[in-house]
Amino acid sequence: DLIVLSGDQLTANDFFRRNATTYYLELGRRLVQYQTPFAIVFGNHDDKPNDATGVAATSRIELLRVLQRHFPSWCVTQPGPSHVTGVSNYWLNIHAPQSSS
């Protein structure tokens, strides 16, 4: 099994810098309750600047590092190859479960 979140987990333009990280930690805590690996693809709103203050949002790479640091056994999200623009443009090899026989 694999949980996949396909972008725009939050609208960062409504969050302050510290709140985006807090939100992602809460998201990770909820996902690990399922004891299933998870992968995230960041959307265009995940790191937009705050509309009210103009303060830059937490970057996608910072959000990814938070998830990888706090949930290393469950977060399989990758930053993606360096020659591809953006963070979380990557692929995962998915394999069938191994037979117990």
Image (cartoon, rainbow, N blue to C red):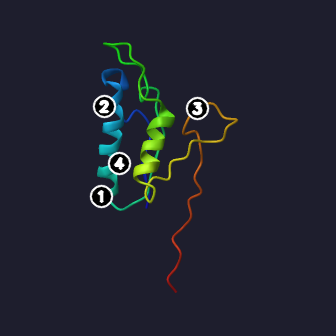
- The answer to whether one can see residue 65 in this image is yes
For marks 2 and 1, the one nearer the N-term is 2
Residue indicated by mark 2: 19
- Left or right relative to 59: residue 94: right
Q: Is residue 79 above or below residue 33?
A: above
For marks 2 and 4, the one nearer the N-term is 2
Residue indicated by mark 1: 33
Q: Nearer the viewer, mark 2 or mark 4?
A: 2
| Identity of the residue drawn at 55% across and 35% down | 87
Q: Nearer the viewer, residue 89 or 98?
A: 89
Q: Is residue 23 above or below residue 48?
A: below
Question: Given contact means CB atoms under 8 Å apart, are the residues at marks 2 and 1 in contact?
Answer: no
Near mark 2 (Cα within 10 A), the count class, few <14, some 14-19 or many ≥20, is some
**SS at badge 4:** helix
Specify the amino acid type for callout 3: Gly
Specify the amino acid type for callout 1: Gln
Question: Given contact means CB atoms under 8 Å apart, are the residues at marks 2 and 3 in contact?
Answer: no
Residue indicated by mark 3: 86
Q: Nearer the viewer, mark 2 or mark 1?
A: 2
Q: CA distance from mark 3 to mark 4?
A: 21 Å
For marks 2 and 3, the one nearer the N-term is 2
| Identity of the residue drawn at 29% across and 51% down | 30
Residue indicated by mark 4: 28
| Image x and y of residue 26, in percent | 29, 44
For marks 4 and 1, the one nearer the N-term is 4
Specify the amino acid type for callout 2: Asn
